[in-house]
Image (cartoon, helix red, strand yellow):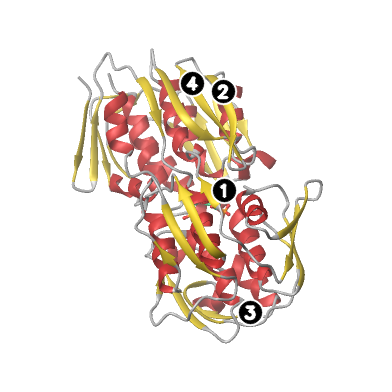
Amino acid sequence: MTEITAKQEDLIVRPSAGLSLRGTIRVPGDKSISHRALMLGAIASGETEIQGLLLGEDPRSTASCFRALGADISELNEQLVKVRGLGVGGLIEPATVLDAGNSGTTLRLMLGILASQPGMFFTVTGDKSLRSRPMSRVVKPLQQMGAQIWGRQDGSLAPLAILGQKLQPIHYPSPIASAQVKSCILLAGLMTEGKTTVTEPSLSRDHSERMLKAFGAQIEVNPDTHSVTVTGPAQLRGQKVVVPGDISSAAFWLVAGAIVPDADLTVENVGINPTRTGILEVLQMMDADIEILEQHSVAGEPVASLRVRHSQLKATTIAGDIIPRLIDEIPILAVAAAFAKGTTVVKDAAELRVKESDRLQVMAAQLNRMGAKVTELPDGLEIIGGTPLHGAEVDSHDDHRCAMSLAIAALRASDTTTIRRAAAAAISYPDFTPTLVQICQ
Ligand code: SPQ
């Protein structure tokens, strides 16, 4: 029998010879949508009801920050969270430091809101990982709008101090395709008179645009130029939000089903917003057997069930405009590539170096400890597939996506793998281990 044991912070995986993966599962709510529902609920007037909120550590950080800013947010649960908002300019100045924990989305999106609250003073911080992640990508455009923000290294590292201002609208051509940069500027634009526009080099996830529209903001999207414009000052009204399952969490099961012999898994209620489905396109390019079933739309977001069965994967190249559409899935795609025939190359993904960990460095080093052949490139990875993996002691470096990716790799390793600091999975997927136990047969 396959043994999966959580021991303090670690996860120990010992796959049996005849391991198979079977079953129908649901993944928790989408993390990006969960953050946005809490934030927009907090700055809308009236009540917002959220069904299917992700109960991971990151949305909990967002909820605690916005409670400190005066929003009335009920106890977090998956059934129904009620947010009584304060209106776009109605936040209160907190008497404490706002702590975004491990969550880049919380800190960067919140900065746009805080910087545009005239006369109010805020201090924001995060955990060790977040305090080393670059903030200049949002601080610089906010400063161009007139924001006053201070922090280490010329305001590029948290902790940050913000003195809210009446901002000026800008047209910001973002040098990177980043939903966090785009969303931060759009949120700052809500309180700013006139048209605030962000243009990205390629399209990043568009949950902010969709949800801002649903809450009543005037949003214009130009798909040809990858531009979004918000017209301020805006009034938002509380809404009912249904959060679909997170495709970034489903990705672990899609790759597990593709690489474990005889596997047959169905993941229900997965959000398949086209700005997030790069993982499906790449796995299909790699000859994965994935069926998209029961497509429908829930509260403005497309949703489907995904069925995956084992198949022999083949190598591919992952580069260019697809990268922002699968940026968080590259660690688990590296695992898929380790079992594919041929050499997979990931390029244009230098952004992975400034996530919760340096994901290129962590995935290359940890998969190599298991016997894989992975070479780090400045902006990606080269993975020679097909080398059998063996059990090893590996380390997530406290990065949730690396932790779960390594646990999936361990299913196809001979002998026992210990994943140090695997408890980081709770950032985005608190029930990852019980679900893994459930499907292992
Ligand atoms: O929130 P955080 O810590 O930045 O989380 C990550 C993740 O893997 O969960 C990235 F490390 O997801 C980001 C994602 O990479 C979430 C996000 C969003 O909700 O807007 C956008 C992406 O980041 P970016 O920098 O490309 O905008």
Q: Which residue is mark 4?
A: 307
Q: Secondary structure at mark 3?
A: loop
Q: Residue at x 49, y 15 (%)?
A: 312
- Identify the image quadrant of the N terminus: top left
Q: Nearer the viewer, residue 230 or 389?
A: 230
Question: Which comes before the other along the chain, label 1 or label 4?
Answer: 4
The alpha-carbon separation of the residues under discs 1 and 4 comes to 35 Å
Q: Which residue is mark 2?
A: 292
Q: Is residue 321 left or right of residue 261?
A: right
Q: Secondary structure at mark 4?
A: strand
Q: Give how far across and how far down residue 295 sits, in percent.
A: 59, 27
Mark 1: C-beta under 8 Å from nearest atom of ligand 1: no
Q: Is residue 38 left or right of residue 435?
A: right
Label at residue 147: 3
Q: Quadrant of residue 252?
A: top left
Q: Residue at x 37, y 39 (%)?
A: 404
Question: Which comes before the other along the chain, label 2 or label 4?
Answer: 2
- Identify the image quadrant of the C terminus: top left
Q: Amino acid at mark 2?
A: Ile
Question: Which comes before the other along the chain, label 1 or label 2?
Answer: 2
Total tally of numbered discs in the picture: 4
User: Do labels 4 and 3 touch, CB within 8 Å?
Assistant: no
Question: Which comes before the other along the chain, label 3 or label 1?
Answer: 3
Q: In the current view of this chain or complex, which residue is farthest to the bottom? A: 119
